[in-house]
Amino acid sequence: MAEDKLGTMILSSDNLNSSLVMPQIPIRPNPGIPKTIGIFLILGSLLVIFEGGGSLFTHFSELSEDEATTQVELMKMLGVEITVDEMLQWDSEFKDSNYHLITGLIKVIAGLLLFIGGVQLILQKYLGGIFSLFGGGLWFLSQVISIFWATIIEERIDISLATQWDLAATAICFICNLFCLILPLIPMFAPAGRAALTPHYSKKKDTFEEEE
């Protein structure tokens, strides 16, 4: 009889009507994820800055006839038939259009954003991913502008220096650019990497909770 009463008490308990809540397993932060990606982004940013600086140097430097002759010989080795006068005209048209100046500035800015983003990720800051994404996107934009703008100029003057190696170089640049866009997303969305970052809003939230 006592057992029946005990069973009735258990079955009629309010706890049976309450829903079970599974305990949340805390995510262990992995600082190595943002730090490693930050290092890769810094290395990539230096290459982008170097490329942009080369474009700026080309814009502000004068191409002498001797240098043009050397470049013509090099282009002939790559299968491009061009004269010294055409090389000088090609160089003049690109400089007059400010092609190297504008594309170089965009690449330098993109490289600086990637560099800042990489440093921020090493410091485990969430903003590092945002800076890196902006830098990668700006670099992608500069490459698209460079390709189409160069094609327009060469078609206008009917002089082309395009070689089969240009396609390979362009493909490599876009692949590197793709990595610069994907890598920042890993610490931003991977649970262990995201837990290692310190968003600005989380600090405000913690301060507010402490005051309460």
Image (cartoon, helix red, strand yellow):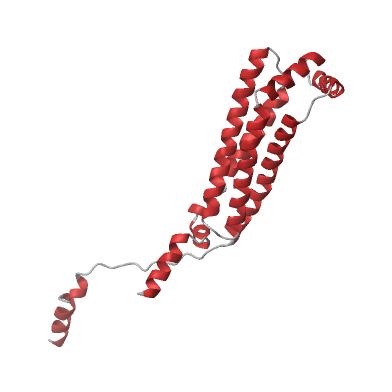
Along the viewing direction, whichever of 203 and 190 lies nearer the viewer: 203
On the image, the x and y values in percent for residue 41 come to 63, 49
On the image, the x and y values in percent for residue 195 come to 49, 61
**Which residue is at a point 51% across and 56% down the rendered structure image?**
126
**Which residue is at a point 70% across and 24% down the rendered structure image?**
95
- In which quadrant will I find the N terminus? bottom left
So how many labels did they put on this image? 0
On the image, the x and y values in percent for residue 103 come to 63, 32
Along the viewing direction, whichever of 101 and 126 lies nearer the viewer: 101
Q: Is 191 rendered above or below residue 145?
A: below
Along the viewing direction, whichever of 145 and 16 lies nearer the viewer: 145
- Which corner quadrant of the image does residue 71 belong to? top right
On the image, the x and y values in percent for residue 150 come to 64, 23
Residue 22 shows in the view:
yes
- Which corner quadrant of the image does residue 164 belong to? top right
- Which corner quadrant of the image does residue 168 belong to? top right
Q: Residue furthest bottom?
A: 2
Q: Along the horizontal axis of the image, is 97 left or right of 60?
A: left
Q: Residue furthest right?
A: 66
**Which residue is at a point 63% across and 20% down the rendered structure image?**
151
Residue 82 shows in the view:
no
**Which residue is at a point 61% across and 42% down the rendered structure image?**
109
- In which quadrant will I find the C terminus? bottom left
Q: Is 210 rendered above or below residue 121?
A: below
Along the viewing direction, whichever of 39 and 51 lies nearer the viewer: 51
Q: Residue furthest top?
A: 158
